[in-house]
Every structure is written in structure tokens, then in C-alpha cells.
Image (cartoon, rainbow, N blue to C red):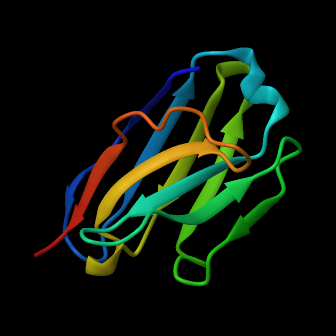
Amino acid sequence: VQLQASGGGLVQPGGSLRLSCTVSHNIFNQHTMGWYRQAPGKQRELVARVSTSGTTVYDNSVKGRFTVSRDNAKRTVYLQMNSLKPEDTGVYYCNRVTIPWDWGKGTQVTVSS
């Protein structure tokens, strides 16, 4: 299974980005998917997840600002990020929330003025 994340970039504080992550196999439809963030010098952390039925859970650090969703037909999970803060900077990855598949390269998000 391969994961292809995209949509990152450089944005000013208060700005928005929409991340996408496409999974190469239909097994995507059987799993709760998560978005993870790895800030410089820190461990990777789970910031949002969406179940197969669309139920969402967020870390307190992003609650009210980020929205996770999925399109099972496209095998794609999305992360809409609004009101971005400098502390949101990091490499973002998607993966299933159980035993992870290969992580792939992720997509870099930099929030800076």
C-alpha cells in the first residue's frame, strides 16, 4: 500500500491549506484514517482521524480549526486547515490508525510570516 500526501506549502499565520492523501489500494475503505504531524525535532503525533463511516476525532490543538474528511470512492482523505498557527508547522502524513502502512514522504506545511 502506498500513501501519497499533497497540498502543503508556506502560508502566513491565519491562512488556510487543504491537504489530500490518496491510498493506492481499496483496503483504504476498511480502515479509520488519521492525519499525523511531525514538527521539527518532535515525534509524530495524531492530530485528526476519520472512521469508515465518517465519525471524526480531533486533538485539542487543532479542534475547531481543522476538518478531516474522506472520499471512499477516490480512496482519499482530506485535511482542511484554517486559522493556521506557527506551531502547526511540520510534515503531515496520513495513515491508518492501527498498524501503519509505509509512511511515505508526507507533505511539508510551514506557517510563518
Image check: 108 left or right of 10?
Answer: right
The residue at the point 53 percent across, 44 percent down is 94
Q: Is residue 104 above or below residue 112?
A: above
Q: Position of residue 101 (x, y in %)?
A: 59, 33
The location of residue 7, given as percent across then percent down, is 35, 41
Number of residue marks:
0
Q: Is 13 above or below relative to 44?
A: below
Q: Nearer the viewer, residue 32 or 1?
A: 1
The residue under the point 43% across, 61% down is 37
Q: Residue at x 46, y 47 (%)?
A: 93
Q: Residue furthest right?
A: 53
Query: Residue, x 74% and y 67% (percent of image)?
Result: 57
Quadrant assignment, res 73: top right
- Pick the front one: 83 or 19: 19
Locate residue 46 relative to residue 98 in the image: left or right. left
Which residue, as the protein is rendered here, is positioned at the far bottom?
Answer: 60
Residue 110 spot, x, y in % from top left: 22, 62
Horizontal side of 49 relative to 45 (left or right) equals right
**The C terminus: image quadrant:** bottom left
**Quarter of the view holding residue 44:** bottom left
Q: Is residue 86 above or below residue 18?
A: below
Q: Is residue 99 left or right of residue 112?
A: right
Name the residue nearer the viewer: 79 or 30.
Answer: 30
Q: Quadrant of the N terminus?
A: top right
Residue at the far top: name it.
Answer: 25
Query: Residue 13 versus residue 91: which sits nearer the camera?
Result: 91
Up-down: is 53 above or below 28? below
